[in-house]
Image: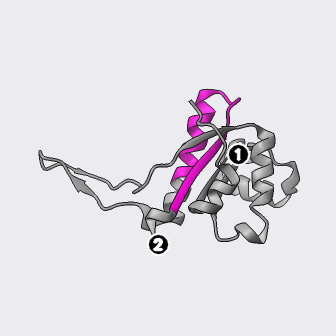
Amino acid sequence: MDLQNEKCVMVIDENLPPGLIVNTAAIMGITLGKEMPEVVGANVTDQSGNQHLGIIEFPVPILKGTPEVIKEIREKLYQPEFRELSVVDFSDLAQGCKTYDEFIGKMAETPENTLQYFGIAICGPKKKVNKLTGSMPLLR
């Protein structure tokens, strides 16, 4: 993987309360780490000899969006042009489940067009990620 030409962004619903914004970012970040372990750097040692686990080797800007914009991006990501991108989404359905088994069951009975996305993370070639998110502002 050519890390110089890779980009990863998260787009999160700017209207969510701060706790849900942080939760959405954390959940998507954990899933990205599982899906793309090659972008997590080696463990490092500080001057005192203490070890620190590796972190992602490139920045992950968090962008602000509305539920409608996030939904629109998610729909575009189903197109063949964007199939090579790694995508993690987090929805109202996922956030409302108490167990993963509950999530599996409910998702199997839910049409995609009824999901409300809290956030979406996209990683892959910079040009494709920028095509989808290049003009979006940072979430501050």
Counting from the top left corner in percent of width and height, residue 31 is at 55, 57
Can I make out residue 47 in this image? yes
Counting from the top left corner in percent of width and height, residue 9 is at 58, 50
Amino acid bearing label 1:
Cys
Query: Which residue corresponds to mark 1?
Result: 97
Q: Could you say whether the residue bearing mark 1 is in a helix, strand or loop? A: loop
Answer with left or right where residue 123 lies relative to residue 104: left
Amino acid bearing label 2:
Met
Start-end of magenta stretch = 6-29
Answer with left or right where residue 83 lies relative to residue 114: left
Earlier along the polypeptide chain: callout 1 or callout 2?
Answer: 2
Can I make out residue 110 in this image? no
Query: Which residue corresponds to mark 2?
Result: 1
Colouring of the image = one colour
Quarter of the view holding residue 65: top right
Counting from the top left corner in percent of width and height, residue 113 is at 87, 53
- Label 1–label 2 contact, CB within 8 A: no
- Give the CA separation, mark 1 to mark 2: 35 Å
* Residue 18 is inside the magenta segment: yes
Residue placed most toward the observer, 47 or 137: 137
On residue 13, which mark appears?
none
Counting from the top left corner in percent of width and height, residue 106 is at 79, 54
Residue in the image at 49% along x and 59% along y: 33
